[in-house]
């Protein structure tokens, strides 16, 4: 199963949520995960090279891949339907390499925040994705939400996003998230993530995963 984490907006939390979701799926759900880092700065892959040295056993692989290389890896993805591939996307849309990635995606997770610029980027990302993969499910995750701020456009934004997909519970803005750069999720962060990740897992990942576990499952599956 291929899960893309994307938004055109830089700083939305794509890379952070990718690795926290990878930690969640391996630790809380014991699922096989491979992270594909397509971010131009390839920050995740670099961080994990360092983490590997520090931690004994790495619970999942992190592969850095340029957008134009994705086509070559596609067979590998198809041959391993039981693996949950998490794809951390770059914060830009002007690259034809994204077409193959969007086509291969089974689920899209889109972190965003409630400001106008983020909203425009979020909608733009969604429309491009849906144009290439009309049947895709998009799950919007409000991220870095500050408790003391009244978000004037929250209701309007949610209303618009609900036309394109679903909106999860919000993830608050906490300094602890900035320590989330190894295979370990910082303690204080876990309870903030569980409602969001449990929901995504139960509604969108579990069934797909179990279907692919059945003998002949992936072959019986229609494309
Ligand atoms: N919920 C959060 N609370 C506080 N900081 C966060 C949160 N989510 C992400 N961050 C921080 O925001 C910055 C941008 O996040 P990042 O995941 O790199 O975004 P993107 O990959 O979308 O560009 C990072 O410094 C990260 O630690
Ligand atoms: Mg990133």
Image (cartoon, rainbow, N blue to C red):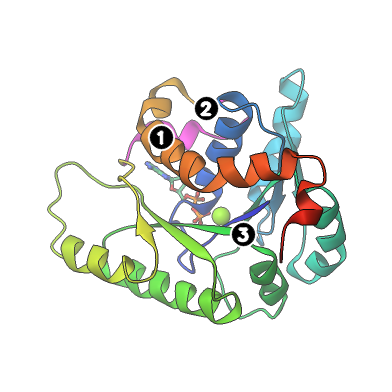
Q: In this rendering, is residue 29 above or below 115?
A: above
Could you tell me what secondary structure mostly forms the magenta stretch? loop
**Image depth: mark 2 or mark 3 in front:** 3
Q: Nearer the viewer, mark 2 or mark 1?
A: 1
**Tag shown at residue 185:** 2
Residue 115: x percent and y percent?
A: 26, 64
The residue sitting at the top extreme is 56
Rendered image quadrant of residue 50: top right
Location of the C terminus (image quadrant):
bottom right
In what element is the residue under mark 1?
A: helix
Name the N-terminal-most of marks 3 and 1.
3
Picture disc at residue 42: none
Q: Nearer the viewer, mark 3 or mark 1?
A: 3
Q: Secondary structure at mark 3?
A: loop
Give the residues drawn in magenta, as a range: 173-185
Q: Are marks 3 and 1 in contact (CB under 8 Å)?
A: no
Q: Which residue is mark 3?
A: 106
- Which element is circle 2 on? loop
Q: Residue at x 81, y 40 (%)?
A: 215
> Considering depth in this image, is 106 or 152 the residue closer to the camera?
106
Among the two numbered marks 2 and 1 on one chain, the one whose residue lies closer to the N terminus: 2
Q: In this figure, which residue is indicated by the disc labeled 1?
A: 193
Label 2 close to label 1 by CB (< 8 Å): yes
Report whether 171 appears left or right of 181: left
Question: Counting residues from the N terminus, which is met first, the one under dot 2 or under dot 3?
Answer: 3
- Near mark 3 (Cα within 10 A), the count class, few <14, some 14-19 or many ≥20, is some
């Amino acid at each position: 199963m291929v899960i893309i984490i994307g938004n055109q907006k830089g700083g939305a939390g794509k890379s952070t949520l990718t690795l926290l979701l990878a930690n969640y799926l391996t630790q809380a759900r014991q699922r096989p995960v491979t992270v594909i880092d397509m971010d131009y700065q390839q920050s995740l892959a670099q961080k994990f090279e360092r983490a590997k040295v520090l931690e004994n056993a790495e619970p999942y692989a992190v592969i850095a891949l340029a957008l134009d290389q994705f086509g070559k890896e596609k067979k590998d993805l198809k041959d391993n339907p039981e693996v949950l591939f998490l794809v951390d996307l770059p914060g830009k849309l002007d690259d034809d390499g994204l077409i193959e990635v969007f086509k291969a995606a089974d689920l899209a997770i889109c972190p965003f925040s409630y400001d106008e610029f983020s909203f425009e980027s979020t909608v733009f990302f969604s429309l491009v994705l849906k144009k290439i993969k009309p049947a895709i499910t998009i799950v919007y995750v409000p991220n870095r939400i500050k408790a003391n701020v009244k978000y004037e456009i929250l209701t309007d934004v949610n209303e618009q996003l609900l036309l394109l997909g679903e909106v999860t519970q919000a993830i608050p803005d906490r300094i602890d998230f900035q320590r989330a750069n190894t295979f370990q999720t910082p303690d204080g962060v876990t309870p903030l993530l569980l409602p969001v990740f449990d929901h995504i897992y139960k509604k969108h990942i579990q069934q797909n995963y179990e279907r692919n576990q059945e003998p002949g499952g992936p072959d019986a599956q229609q494309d």
